[in-house]
Image (cartoon, helix red, strand yellow):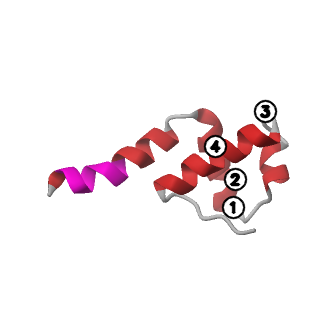
Amino acid sequence: MLKLQAEPLDLMFQALSDPSRRAMVERLAQAPASVSQLAQPLDMSLPAVVQHLQVLEASGLITTEK
């Protein structure tokens, strides 16, 4: 039972281990934002931002809409 509870928590900690992803979560905690808005203050390409968002979504920390 403990292992089943640890897996989602492990995913969350892994997702939050990256400073860029933490910055995205902080920004999204204020209000919804587009990928372009999230990428603006970061020094990375849009595809890289999308990959980070996929990690955050897989961890259950965010949801995305198209």
**On the picture, is 3 further left or further right than 26?**
left
Left or right: 45, with 4 as reference point: right
Q: Position of residue 38 (x, y in %)?
A: 77, 49
Q: Please state the total of marks drawn on the protein image.
A: 4
Q: Main secondary structure of the magenta part?
A: helix
Residue 30's tag is 1
Q: In terms of secondary structure, where does tag 4 sit?
A: helix
Q: Give the label, 3 or 1, closer to the camera.
A: 3
Q: CA distance from mark 3 to mark 4?
A: 11 Å
Badge 1 vs badge 2, beta-carbon distance below 8 Å: yes
Determine the residue located farthest toward the bottom in the rendered image: 65
Task: Name which residue lies at 60% across and 34% down.
Answer: 19
Q: Which residue is mark 3?
A: 44
Task: For the residues labelled 1 and 4, say whether their Cβ atoms are less than 8 Å apart.
Answer: no
Please name the residue that numbered disc 4 is placed on.
52
Q: Are marks 3 and 4 in contact (CB under 8 Å)?
A: yes
Find numbered disc 2 in the image and state the secondary structure of the residue it sits on. helix
Q: CA distance from mark 1 to mark 2?
A: 6 Å
**Left or right relative to 39: residue 18:** left
Q: Magenta residues?
A: 3-9
Question: What amino acid type should be assigned to the residue bearing mark 4?
Answer: His
